[in-house]
Image (cartoon, rainbow, N blue to C red):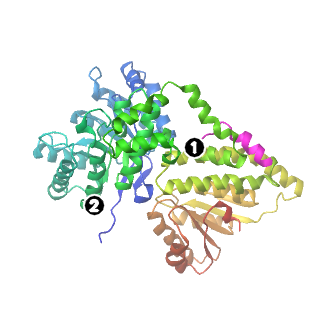
Amino acid sequence: MSTPRYTRLSGLEPLVITPDLLFVNVGERTNVTGSAQFRKLIKEERYEEAVEVARQQVANGAQILDVNMDEGLIDSEKAMTRFLNLIMSEPDIARIPVMVDSSKWTVIEAGLKCLQGKSVVNSISLKEGEAVFIEQARKVLRYGAAAVVMAFDEVGQADTCARKVEICTRAYTVLTEQVGFPPEDIIFDPNIFAVATGIEEHDNYAVDFIEATREIKRTLPHCHISGGVSNVSFSFRGNEMVRQAIHSVFLFHAIKAGMDMGIVNAGGMPIYDELDPDLRERVEDVILNRRKDGTERLLEIAERYKGSKGAAKAEDLAWRNKPVRARLAHALVHGIDAYVETDTEEARQQSTRPLDVIEGPLMDGMNVVGDLFGAGKMFLPQVVKSARVMKKAVAYLLPFIEAEKLRTGDVGKSNGKIIMATVKGDVHDIGKNIVGVVLACNNFDVVDLGVMVSAQVILDRAREENADLIGLSGLITPSLEEMSHVAREMQRQGFEIPLLIGGATTSRAHTALKIDPHYTAPTVWVKDASRAVG
């Protein structure tokens, strides 16, 4: 079995693409061909507002930012250079990698010259023959970038499963054997085309993409699969609800087949299980080409979801009639913060202690989020929105928790000091932050070192603070080895305090077999925040 090779990209912060991420969201709104708003801003040279579009994409959970300036009336090279230079001076945007997207090589090269870290070129292909393909691939290597490779050769774009696999296999062979291109830096785009067009030849386009994805991932080691997801719903322009349903269903099946990256507005996408069952069934008929009348059946109900904003709003708010625990869970799963303080207050009044709201309904809701994310039915940007709702609810409860401490005389009675950190190589801190809040509410002094923290920094700070515990967190697979390294260092440097292990990729078995043997003091796996206190 071959050793896993992970794609490592970076802006100011690293992005290591491992299977644990499930799906990497590439922000689509900074693209003049896909966003009329962004195109207008660039054409009118309103760059400050254009930068805010990029900032919003990052805030909504984009892990890579796609930037495209291909428009006939725009000087694409000049616009690309100016825009990238502006966003590179904004740390909250520049922290994620950029995908330089253009059909013109000169524009791509102009963009690459502006970027630090490791970016992505979108795209190169065999459409002009192998010689040009090899030359461009070598330049991509020289700039230290990864590459999106289109399923496009001298004959044209691949539209069938067989052609997609054939072209991608040929490109993979050329890149790995003639260019020396790292296979983990190859991102294939097997072409997502519109379905439900009314043209019979188009009916199998989504199936062709999904099956090609499955075969490419099976036969071409370490590569990734991406695509422009909004293409698949192009036939339903103007009907945003149906389009989003198509995207959700398409991604659900494509991700299971091996698609691990895509240009999509995932932050605003409905959750697969939450779609209207009738709409989901008919969309699924179209995506999977299960019925010859699939397009007609989807068109029959499409009008239901178009232009009926009042009805849609009433349906959206039906969840407000549920019990408060269910309302809080719904708000967390859907990332809705509009009512969370009202619902949190209602839950507080029904609880013995304000902390019970955190350890009860709020943690229950976050556990649902975790289960949906693990099943591929939610994407990381949606999880980030859920975490923001959780943070707002906790912030509302904190004054009540402090007031309770004053009443009961708990102020100043510390249960101990804990050093918490997301380990080196990992930038994910949602779970760690929630655990920190729960511990702080239970009279632990929490020293949060943040993300990407090396073993030595953790141990130096533990000594400096005279800590009673160390808590390590991580979301991605490489974090597991880093946690083992921290345990070995704790043993070597004579630590005797308990070590807590938590995060999405951790488990009781892994902690017992791979971390605990390296450290003689207690090593404890923490399944979720509510168990951290015990």
The residue to which callout 2 is attached is 218
What is the magenta segment's predominant secondary structure?
Answer: helix
Q: Position of residue 294 (x, y in %)?
A: 35, 39
Residue at figure coordinates x 46%, y 39% from the top left: 279
Residue in front for this viewpoint, 246 or 98: 246
Task: Classify 77 as above or below 191.
Answer: above
Residue at figure coordinates x 40%, y 55% from the top left: 16
> In the rendered structure, does residue 55 fall within the stretch colored magenta?
no
Check disc 2 and give the amino acid type.
Arg
Task: Classify 85 as above or below 490.
Answer: above
Asked if residue 146 shows in the view, the reply is no
Say few, some or many: other residues with alpha carbon within 10 Å of mark 2 (under 14 / 14 to 19 / 20 or more). few
Residue at figure coordinates x 82%, y 62% from the top left: 413
Whole-angstrom CA distance, mark 1 to mark 2, is 34 Å
Say few, some or many: other residues with alpha carbon within 10 Å of mark 1 (under 14 / 14 to 19 / 20 or more). many
> Any mark on residue 455, and which?
none
> Any mark on residue 334, and which?
1
Q: Position of residue 488 (x, y in %)?
A: 51, 75
Quarter of the image for residue 418 reads bottom right
Task: Classify 496 as above or below 187.
Answer: below
Q: Which residues are magenta?
A: 335-348
> In the rendered structure, does residue 341 fall within the stretch colored magenta?
yes
Q: Secondary structure at mark 1?
A: helix
Q: Position of residue 452 (x, y in %)?
A: 50, 57
Q: Is residue 517 left or right of residue 416?
A: left
Q: Position of residue 475 (x, y in %)?
A: 50, 59
Q: Is residue 324 left or right of residue 26?
A: right
Quarter of the image for residue 205 reads top left
Q: Considering only order in the chain, which callout, 2 or 1, is on the residue closer to the N terminus?
A: 2
Check disc 1 and give the amino acid type.
His
